[in-house]
Image (cartoon, grey):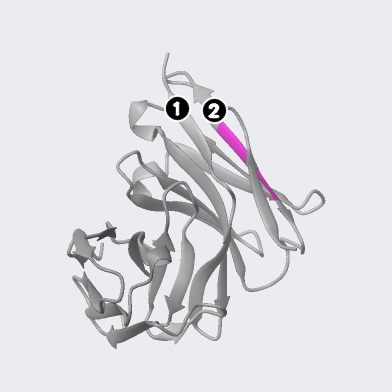
Amino acid sequence: QVQLRESGPGLVKPSQTLSLTCTFSGGSISSSGYYWSWIRQYPGGGLEWFAYVSYSGYTYYIPTLKGRLSTSMDTSKNTFSLELTSVTAADTAIYYCARYTCSRGSCHIDHWGQGTLVTVSS
Amino acid sequence: DIQMTQSPSYLSASVGDRITLTCRTSQGIGSYLAWYQQKPGKVPKVLIYGASTLYSGVPSRFSGSGSGTDFTLTISSLQPEDFATYFCQKYDSVPPTFGQGTKVEIK
């Protein structure tokens, strides 16, 4: 059964670093065609896709976060992780990890983690 | 960046109604569009990808159409479990951006 699960602190102080890890089970994160993604949902409901690491290790970050964000994957543990530095209250959101599947030119997110609420506050 | 606009933002409808939600992009994206449904407190679930391909297990009352810049999601007969927020998402290029969502509420 395919599952993703985020782990990490739910409260981060302003200017500190947000670190989250996603553990994938039910397959290998090295399998081709998958892009291991980070998506956040703001309190108002909007969804923002902000990063992914591909099955081959290629990474993409949205330009507005590029200087603050890094991602990695650990194939031995079947995990992928993110670090977001210098957080502010604007980074408060539910953070999801997700599997973005692409096949024959068509893509969609077929599995999501349950989401973890991260609050930036002193 | 390509802008995505969903309309309406809110829709009030009754069980059994046929409803159509719209997603417009500021530039053409071919058929590289997916639709997701999100219920309160739950994660989004994919309904349609490739603008019109129904994801496995999704009821046939859901259908998608469109290409280029104008897309629609239609629910042919609204069921109680369909009251939710619906997001479109483009994937022609990075980033795979979401629309702001349409919330479907019970009239």
Residue A89 in view in this figure:
yes
Residue most extreme to the top:
A122
- Chain ID, mark 2: A
Whether residue B72 appears in magenta in the rendering, the answer is: no
| Amino acid beneath label 1 | Thr
Q: CA distance from mark 1 to mark 2?
A: 6 Å
Residue for point 24% across, 76% down: B19
Residue most extreme to the right:
A76
* Quarter of the image where the C terminus of chain A is located: top left
* Quarter of the image where the N terminus of chain A is located: bottom right
Image coordinates for residue A85, horizontal then vertical, percent: 48, 30
Which residues make up the magenta segment?
A19-23
Q: Earlier in the sequence, mark 1 or mark 2?
A: 2
* Residue nearest the observer in this picture, B25 or A3: A3
Magenta segment main secondary structure = strand
Q: Would you place residue A80 above or below residue A58 in this image?
A: above
Residue for point 42% across, 82% down: B50
Image coordinates for residue B10, horizontal then vertical, percent: 20, 58
Q: Is residue A54 left or right of residue B92?
A: right
Residue for point 60% across, 37% down: A20
Q: Would you place residue A92 above or below residue B32 in this image?
A: above
Q: Which residue carries the number 2 mark?
A: A10
Q: What secondary structure is found at the residue carrying circle 2? A: loop
Q: Which residue carries the number 1 mark?
A: A119
